[in-house]
Amino acid sequence: MTSPSPDPATPLGRLGQVAGSVAQVVAPLSVLTALLFYFGYASSRARYLYFGVDVDTIGLSTQDYVMRSPEPLLTPLLVLALLAVVVAVVHERVRHRVQAALADAEDADPQVAASGRHRVERGSRQARAVVVTGDALLLVGVLLLVGFPSWGGWAYYPLVTPLLMAAGTGLALYGRRIARSLRPGQPPSGVVTVVLSVLLVISVFWATATFAEWSGRGAAREAARHLDRLPAVILDTTERLHLTSRGVRETALEPSEGQTFRYRYRDLRLLVQGEDRVFLVPERWDASNSTLVVPMDDSVRLQFRFLNDPP
């Protein structure tokens, strides 16, 4: 025996409605936050790895990664939006043609009905061709996936493989949908549709993650070409650092009463600031350079220089 549902007019019923509405909003927001976090993490990891820093040692928060996600996601989102517009326009035209062909096939005029049936058959052949093309692209993507030991070293492998799989599954799904619309009595293949849909989502996710990593590495290369655009830092320390990076100037500070800092380092730039440390790089890129990790405690003193651009 099932228990009766709460009356919406009662406080318990209103509370249930509010809880259901909150759940419908919170769940998508949680998924969206997780996706933004992952893509921000993938981009940041590739970016700081270029400078020899493991992003997990920086101590960035979830909000930091989420705030860093729009840059790598901008291009994929624009591409997906344009692709959605193209697909919507094409689908609208195809739908009108399918409806017109099916209506003519049921017309009382034998000539009109014959023309309609001919168009339905031609549309079915075209839909099967789309399905075969999609299956072929998907097969190539799967072969690349299976052949990872041989092809994994190809620079474009992590992008070409998911794009082939995404294009293949998308065409296969759409071709099957058009074929079913041309045969109204044909039962839908639910298992195949679910499997292809899951493959499509995974492939798009993989391609977006790859682009996020490439975007992070590209941003790192751009920053390395223009390190002088990063915030300029003057570092004072209590002990000599014995830096090996070229271009960093070291000077000894004159001893004085109460002065604990003995060395000053110039021509450093702030790469990123973590929770309890900062990461500094030389002002000019060189193959022998390294990233300096400085703890935020009493053993160091940081000064940030003004830009050389008078107001």
Image (spheres, grey):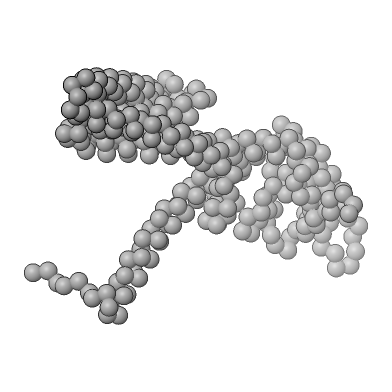
Q: Quadrant of residue 281?
A: top right
> Left or right: where does residue 24 sit relative to residue 311?
left
The residue at 59%/44% (across/down) is 71
List the single residue furthest toward the left: 1
Number of numbered callouts drawn: 0
Tell me the quadrant of the picture where the N terminus can be found. bottom left
- The residue nearer to you, when weighing 287 against 128, is 128
Residue 22 visible, this orientation:
yes
Could you say where residue 86 lies in the image, as x and y percent from the top left? 46, 33
- The residue nearer to you, when weighing 38 against 90, is 90
> Left or right: where does residue 180 sit relative to residue 305?
left
The residue at 42%/37% (across/down) is 88
Could you say where residue 149 lies in the image, as x and y percent from the top left? 41, 23
- The residue nearer to you, when weighing 26 against 66, is 26
Q: Quadrant of residue 286?
A: top right
The residue at 70%/39% (across/down) is 223
Could you say where residue 290 lies in the image, as x and y percent from the top left? 70, 40
